[in-house]
Amino acid sequence: MSSDQDAAHRAREAFTARFGGEPEGVWAAPGRVNVIGEHTDYNGGFVLPIALEHTTRAAVARRGDGRFAAASLQDDGGAVELDLADLAPGSPEGWAGYPAGVVTGLRDRLPGGISVLVDSEVPVGAGLSSSAALTCSVALALRDLVAPELDGPDLVEIARGAENDFVGAPTGILDQSASVLCTAGHALFLDTRDRSSEQVPLDLAGAGLALLVVDSGVTHEHAGGGYGDRRRECEEAARRLGVDLLREVEDVDRLAVLSDGTAEGELLLRRARHIVTEDARVLEVVSALRGDADPRTIGPVLTAGHESLRDDFEISVPLLDAIVESALDAGAHGARMVGGGFGGSAIALVDADAVDAVTAAVTTRFEREGAPAPRTFVTVPSAGARRLA
Ligand code: GLA
């Protein structure tokens, strides 16, 4: 990982090479992994993410010609450039839609337009929120340059609006909240209904533990398909239960009324059961971490979360299951897929001295499955979005 200083320098130089002139500053925002609390965010429930060390950097400067220009060091296709007035969903297409969506959210503050140079170390398509890192780095830049009254939760909303309304990915607020609000050494316990949050200390290294991230290499795409289906299924289950949000159901037994003898009723029951039990798992993990409990005790709760995502929510894929199984067989205390599902990454909670053995076990399993060797790394709870220069 680049140091903040090196990252700022690289983004600055790249900005000047691409656009001429100096950027007004460089901002960074991280990707995330969620410790527990998956698909609860759009159900008004609880989440517990940490920020990754991996960040996306945005070097930004206002312009005078009313244009939006964006370039990325990870895209050699050249800069995207168009009039601010022409920004609209689908225009521009591709990755530039994310910063364009953020700029659109504050368009009246930027009459002269803006240039953005992006450089990212957050793996794309790995379920690690590269898109939130991108939107949040730009949102923070615009806050500092033209909208100083905005606070963290406002930035989360602007970034989410870019993703939902501009790019058309129907996500909740987990990723953007993690990217903006996380702090080093802590997991962010967020109630997505009233947006209250708490920084929960998470010193894994101090307990002789490590959090291993394994990218399955199966890429996912939230703008289409299964993610939106799950949202609709949760909404329908809530409607049949007579609640606004599944978060309001605390007792799993209440879900029995969904079972009406039809296949659809059974499916909605399973979807809702994941959400209700997942909210309970977040609370269980938070109370363990707040107390003196050995963090190893959260391992089985993480694994139960995976089983629920696999069996009730049905968003795992065979390679994610393979990571979890092989990590547990090799001695991990717990393991689960993270993020929206249908691909992406999994995490495993392992003793620090077992990282190599667990990594080797997962890699061997991938070989056996005929899959390319997975990318793996150990992560620690890192800082949220910040200005670098
Ligand atoms: C994706 C979405 C988030 C959240 C997770 C699942 O990452 O962007 O809003 O719903 O999936 O927990």
Image (tube, rainbow, N blue to C red):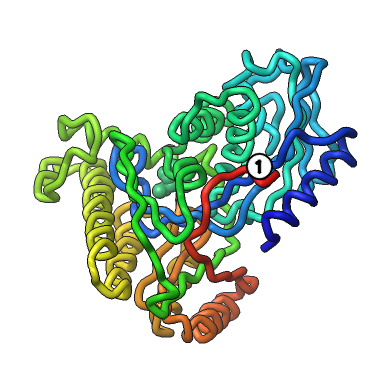
> In the image, is the residue at mark 1 within 8 Å of ligand 1 by its beta carbon?
no
Asked whether, in this view, residue 103 is left or right of residue 324, the answer is right
Q: In front: 134, or 269?
A: 134
Looking at the rendering, which quadrant does residue 294 occupy? Answer: bottom left
Q: In front: 274, or 203?
A: 203
Please tell me which residue is depicted at 78% across the width and 20% down the height of the picture: 67
Q: Position of residue 320 (x, y in %)?
A: 47, 65
Asked whether, in this view, residue 137 is left or right of residue 152, the answer is right
**Residue kind at label 1, given as amino acid type:** Trp
Q: In the structure shown, which secondary structural element does the residue marked by tag 1 occupy?
A: strand
Asked whether, in this view, residue 82 is left or right of residue 385, the answer is right
Please tell me which residue is depicted at 52% across the width and 66% down the height of the picture: 379
**Considering only vertical position in the picture, is 157 above or below 277?**
above
The image quadrant where one finds ligand 1 is: top left
Q: Answer yes or no: is residue 148 visible.
A: yes
Asked whether, in this view, residue 47 is left or right of residue 388, the answer is left
Q: Which residue is mark 1?
A: 27
Q: Position of residue 111 (x, y in %)?
A: 71, 13
Q: Position of residue 210 (x, y in %)?
A: 46, 74
Q: Position of residue 85 (x, y in %)?
A: 71, 13
Q: In front: 23, or 82?
A: 23
Please tell me which residue is depicted at 83% across the width and 34% down the height of the picture: 79
Please tell me which residue is depicted at 53% across the width and 33% down the height of the picture: 159
Q: Answer yes or no: is residue 263 visible.
A: no
